[in-house]
Image (cartoon, rainbow, N blue to C red):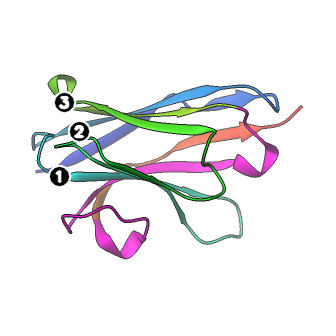
Amino acid sequence: QAQLVESGGGLVQPGGSLRLSCVVSGFSLGYFYIGWFRQAPGKEREGVSSISTSDGRTDYADSVKGRFTISRENAKNTVYLQMNSLKPEDTGVYYCAVARVFRLSLASSDYTTWGQGTQVTVSS
């Protein structure tokens, strides 16, 4: 059974950095697409970034381009989200998920199994 577990969230000041990790089990990376999403209180879940774990192609939401970097380490069954120059509007619960489609996507409807999420708070 597929399972995803996020970690690395926390409280950081504006301009700071965090690295989130998503460890997957029950299947092997190198074939699937993994996405990172976030949800702020009172807002809909939004796609942040997506990666092909086979060839490393990536996609980003406009709001995070140039600040966030998604990467994978297939041997460790782990996908990372490096977040730099964080802003208060980046605050939310961050989730990783495995896609049920075989293409880059930032649409939550294209994803099936989700992790439990990790809280990121950007505040001074």
Question: What range is drawn magenta here?
Answer: 85-111
Give the distance between the C-alpha atoms of the residues marked 1 and 3, in whole angstroms.
Answer: 11 Å
In the rendered view, would you say 14 is above or below 47?
A: above
Mark 1 surroundings: few (<14), some (14-19) or many (≥20) residues within 10 A:
some
| Label 2 crowd bin: few (<14), some (14–19), many (20+), radius 10 Å | many
* Alpha-carbon span between mark 2 and mark 1: 11 Å
Identify residue for label 1.
32
Q: Which of 49 and 6 is in front in this view?
A: 49
Instruction: Pinpoint residue 90: horizontal percent, then vertical percent.
Output: 70, 48
Front residue (pair 94, 69): 69
Label 1 sits on a secondary structure element that is loop
- In the displayed structure image, the side of residue 22 where residue 41 appears, left or right: right
Q: Do the residues labelled 1 and 3 touch (CB within 8 Å)?
A: no
Q: Residue at x 63, y 38 (%)?
A: 67
Q: Which residue is drawn at 81% across and 28% down?
A: 13
- Whether pointer 3 and pointer 2 mark residues with C-beta atoms closer than 8 Å, the reply is no
**Residue 61: x, y in percent?**
56, 58
Disc on the earlier residue, 1 or 3: 1
Q: Name the residue under label 3.
A: 74
Q: Distance between the residues labelled 3 and 2?
A: 10 Å
Q: What residue type is labelled 3?
A: Asn
Residue at which label 2 appears: 24
Residue 99, relative to residue 56: is it above or below? below
Type of amino acid under label 1: Phe
Depicted 95 relative to depicted 20: above or below = below
Looking at the image, which residue is at 41% across and 49% down?
A: 116
